[in-house]
Image (spheres, rainbow, N blue to C red):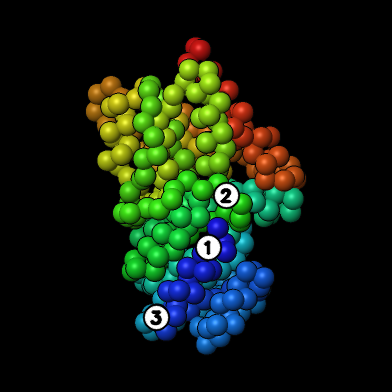
Amino acid sequence: MRDTFVRTLIDIAKDDKNVHLITGDLGFGVLKPFWEQLPDQFTNAGIAEQNMTSFAAGLALQGKAVFTYSIGNFPTLRCLEQIRNDCAYHNANVKIVCVGGGFVYGSLGMSHHATEDLAIMRALPDVTVLAPGDLVEAECATRAIYQHQGTCYLRLGRGGEKRIHEKIDDFQIGKAIKIKNGEKVVIFSTGAIFDEVVDAIQSMEEHSINPALYTFPIVKPIDRAAIEECAEQYELIVTVEEHNIIGGFGSAVSEVLAELPGPRARILKIGLDDRYSSIVGSQKYLRDVYGMSAEKIVKRIQGIFCE
């Protein structure tokens, strides 16, 4: 995803000299093509994310479209006050980009596990939150936040994500994307955890469970219409996120469901069960440990239908 983001941003920045990319002293192997081709539109702010964010806000308030870039929690939690006070409050045109959402940097420990970022960024007024699930969504999301005025958060994986789409004809902020129809159960996925969801569905189909599937590359504003439609059509809505189940994507869906009148689908939220990820290991290993692997997703859903 990060390579796709950089390639897309280079295309955008070549056509718009007001686009500026700031890194917090990270990502040089990936960002090198940008600074080589567009050196006047690139700044390394050093390991000083608070300064990076305030600097970005200042540039944005002078007419620039500014992208900040770092890994894990560094461009978000480390400089949350600056995002809130300098960027979001002023509706500054700053696009905060995190590479390594969830357990991408699993071997570096909990300080690098980005598992509360969606909830925290979603809580800030007027901040648009995106978590694409594949390379096509990542490209569309990058172009969408460039065109969207105001502060945005783009949460990326790292690389090697499975391809969902050949193309997306009508990518819109605030709209989910239907992948397939199904029966009784529908799975909502956000971010790079989508590859586990695909494997889980293939396994369930072999055991006569045929879930519908939507991907939600936009967490805020959430697609209320898609949720409401599925709540009437299916018995169970399952949300899957590589993130704490408190305050994140599943909570956003639950908020919509809670306001619906009459009978509706029940919800199962799959993610990190309101705890710190204190174990160290690969992304694949940690997904399984914390119940987000394809096998664990299948077991959770089968458990409900066997009640």
The reply to whether dot 3 and dot 1 touch (C-beta < 8 Å) is no
Residue found 50% across the figure and 23% down from its top:
205
Secondary element at tag 2: loop
- Per the image, the residue denoted by label 2 is 161
Q: Which mark is residue 16?
A: 3
Does residue 271 lie above or below 222 as drawn? above
Does residue 144 lie above or below 86 as drawn? above
Q: Which mark is residue 4?
A: 1
Q: In terms of depth relative to the viewer, which is nearer, 110 or 172? A: 172
Q: Assign the N terminus to one quadrant of the image.
A: bottom right
Label 3: few (<14), some or many (≥20) within 10 Å? few
Kind of residue sitting beneath label 1 = Thr
Q: Is residue 135 left or right of residue 106?
A: left
Residue 270 point in image, percent of width and height: 53, 33
| Distance CA(mark 2)–CA(mark 1) | 11 Å
| Distance CA(mark 3)–CA(mark 1) | 18 Å
Residue 75 point in image, percent of width and height: 56, 65
